[in-house]
Amino acid sequence: MSYGGRVEKVEVPEVKLQAQADSKAEEWTEAINQAREYYNATGVYTDGSMNEYGMVGGGWYVERGKRFGGLTLGKLATVWDGEVCGIRGALEDALSEANVLILSDAQAAIAAVKKAGYTGRARTRDLKIVMEGIRERQVRLGPNAVSFGWVKAHNELYGNEEADRLAKETTNLYFEDPQITQGGLKQALRKMREEERRVKGVGMGRVVKWNRKVRVAYVQCRTGKGNLQAWHHKIGKADNLECRKCRRYAETGKHIALVCTHGEDIGRRWSTWEDMDDRAKWARKEKHEKGFYTVDLVEMVFSKIDLY
């Protein structure tokens, strides 16, 4: 696990570059040059990336001498970890420079560095190394030895494009020392749960905003437990299993959701759980005065099933 820890508190300068998000590359370049001259600093671009297989890496590009590099973190890290890794590599590569201006397109990474500076706590190993490097430089060279600035991503800034390219390349390299971060573990567990739901077919991992009644009815039908005659009979609270709607079959969750004739009357369009999870079965486009919107037929049907 990539643990951080306590670090000495430092003030991390952030440069507000005189350019807007919609400014052209020439305007950004001019703003960066002004900041470099003001701080007498070397511009260093950093970036992080994750490929389609979940591999994470960080890259950097040092303007003076056109030095560059990248580091691979592995699969149990986040893009944020890749951004911080790029900053770490940049500081280590630019040891010979006096003052450096770290230019990143990740506001979250810059904010994390500043927060670690005033709280004295770094959440990952790489962030701890970054803070120690900033502290060492400030003691040796002064308070402006390391400053940070946000730049817009993919705006044809050569240094930013190079850092982005290097970060992406490192995600395809072999790694000897993978990092396992807290954020990476949470991300992996979330993906694993989504994949399990997708494999089992239960909702296909779909995120919904149903009201309580709909959620209760859906969960009881999917689990077969709750206000169902078959369940009541199983736990000794009912004398029979007969469906209270159609009076023909046992009232199980599967029967209510997929078979009962009452479901047909209220708009059911599926006969298997897999069909219910198929968007082609549960989604219907309807015209509204402001345009078209999607009707969730699963929500509509379960809102009419009273299992409270």
Image: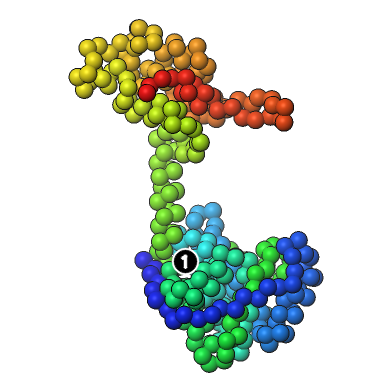
Q: Number of callouts in the render?
A: 1
Question: Mark 1 highlights which residue?
Answer: 73
169 or 152: which is nearer to us? 152
Residue found at the far left of this picture: 236
In the image, residue 77 sits, relative to residue 257, either above or below, namely: below
**Which quarter of the figure has residue 7?**
bottom left
Residue positioned 32% across, 22% down in the render: 227
- Relative image position of residue 305 (x, y in whole percent): 43, 20
Q: Position of residue 252 (x, y in %)?
A: 33, 19
Q: Residue 283 in the image: x percent, y percent?
A: 57, 27
Measured along the vertical axis of the image, is residue 93 above or below residue 271? Answer: below
Q: Label 1 amino acid? A: Leu
Q: Up-down: is 158 above or below 260?
A: below
| Image point (41%, 63%), residue name | 181
**What is the secondary structure assignment of the residue under circle 1?**
strand
Quadrant holding the N terminus: bottom left
